[in-house]
Image: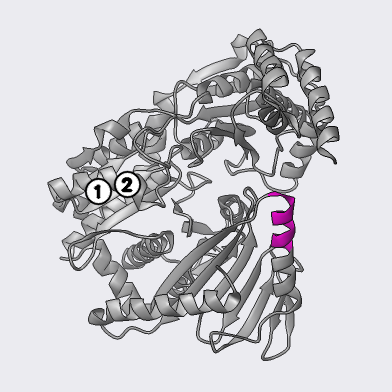
Amino acid sequence: MSEVNLLEKVKNEANKWLNYNIDEESKKQIRYLLENDETELIDSFYKNLEFGTGGLRGIMGVGSNRMNIYTVGMATQGLCNYLLKEFKSYKEIKIAIAHDSRNNSRLFAEKTAEICSANDIKVFLFEDLRPTPELSFAIRHLGCQSGVVITASHNPKEYNGYKTYWEDGGQIIAPHDKNIINEVLKIKSVDEVKFNANKELISIIGKEIDEVYIDKLLSLSLSKEAIKQNSDLKIVYTPIHGTGVKLVPMILKKMGFTNVYNVPEQDISDGNFPTVYSPNPEEAAALSMAMEKAKTIDAEIVMGTDPDADRVGIIVRNKQGELVLLNGNQAASILIYYLLLKWSENKKLTGKEYIVKTIVTTELITDIAESFNVEHFHVLTGFKYIADIIKQNEGKKVFIGGGEESYGYLVGEYVRDKDAVMSCAMFAEIAAWARSNDKTMFDILLEIYLKFGMYKEKLVSLVKKGKSGSDEIKQIMNDFRDNPPDKINNSKVLIIHDYLTGKTKNLETRKETNITLPKSDVLQFILKDGSKISLRPSGTEPKIKIYVSAKEKINNIEQYIETDDILNSKISKILDELGIE
């Protein structure tokens, strides 16, 4: 489409919005864009903000390609239409709604509640900001058929989002994801949205859900005596201006920890995230203020949660006493090892237990599970797939825990999404248990490496914007799919998993087997030396992600730094050979 035709199309769409029954301030902004800012006008109206398999996510502002009460409203109307069809035999359909600390989150949550009530759906709306995992818990606790949380996770401050959940407390998956998308696409006009709320159908919830949620999480503790012995463990926690501000300190206090320090500047719930460049606990910079506090008070562990408190970054002291940020694979490995060890020691393993990880998460977790003879599942990237495994096995097997490399973890079956409130409690417990054994959490990690081999992982994201970028990403995947390498870094490729074709090829036996997971554009190469390379286009951003995992045997703790250097070199050589810049 030519620039002239695109601009004409955009102006027509903007004028359509001026004729909708929208507020005067929005109309004023649209008129301003029409008269003064063609670039922003095009960005705001050149397409409809896409309702994907998880919901909406986008920059806030006026227009069809922005997060605002009208695009949120159209999404909600589509969701309501699907719920009314899917649960038409129910006497009452119920939905729970929560939101984070982002700008406009409360407004979007209230509008979602009003539209649901206007469609004769019973609404449970949290009184104030709450963690995403508590929304997941509330859905099942209150017997709801669906749930919505307004959040854009760790995206920049300009963004907001809308995540949809099903009656099991997990994010929507097939067939409901596609069916809801179809209903949303049928909404062609803002004027089709029922905005007139039925206030009698909206119940405000809060403290009573907090208490039940926290009590359930406390029941998952495995080392109460260790916590009692080490109640003075020095912990620094920051919510990074987000929703963990109340419940994380609450659960740590209820567990018995008495030396929990906060970062006052970051306890302020502020959607502008004024003290950080990005509220992402995967990045050490987001936790720098907490680290400074830890140095001042000589804390043993630092924990920081993202704005909706479903992911957590963990900082511990290494052998030199330095504060280091564990990556998601390391933290997940420590968590799973601790859970399985304690379950084994407590003689709770019966053969019906299992753990779950995503396909791009470290294989160290597989080694750990196999050493305890515990069943392990591998799922596609996304915690909704872990939730689906729990749903499939409910009442037949027992989910102990699971995680993914992107700093999301879950213990037990009360919640069906990654839970940073629970994770903070469990990592604090692990630190206390380690101290009871005259060790640190870093010591536990080194012991795991000694027992199973040392794993190192690296994620490289290549940003490829626009249509040309999209075409380039497709070409990269096609090239690796059509012409797979025989060797990478002088190690033979033994196995190729192609999740798009649903086939696994063993290059030694020449046998081909079916992959039972849903189709997804992911390629994996398993090498003879234990290395694993995964290539996956992002589903939400214009980038392709390359995950590299390497493994080396380590004979003693003194070899840690040397082995770490060897692994870094191996990963660099793999990336160089793949042509990844």
The residue at 29%/47% (across/down) is: 288
Q: Label 1 vs label 2: CA separation?
A: 6 Å
The residue at 44%/23% (across/down) is: 128
- Amino acid type of disc 2? Leu
The residue at 41%/52% (across/down) is: 282
* Residue topped by disc 1: 291
* Residue topped by disc 2: 287
Q: Secondary structure at mark 2?
A: helix
Q: Is 230 or 5 nearer to us in this picture?
A: 5
Q: Quick check: is 350 in the magenta stretch?
A: no
- The reply to whether callout 1 and callout 2 are in contact (CB within 8 Å) is yes
Point out the stretch of residues depicted in magenta. Answer: 466-474
Can you see residue 572?
Answer: yes
Can you see residue 520?
Answer: no
On screen, residue 484 above or below 546: below
Q: Quick check: is 470 in the magenta stretch?
A: yes
- Number of residues whose C-alpha sits closer than 10 Å to that of mark 2, classed few (under 14), some (14–19) or many (20 or more): many
- Amino acid type of disc 1? Met
On screen, residue 559 above or below 243: below
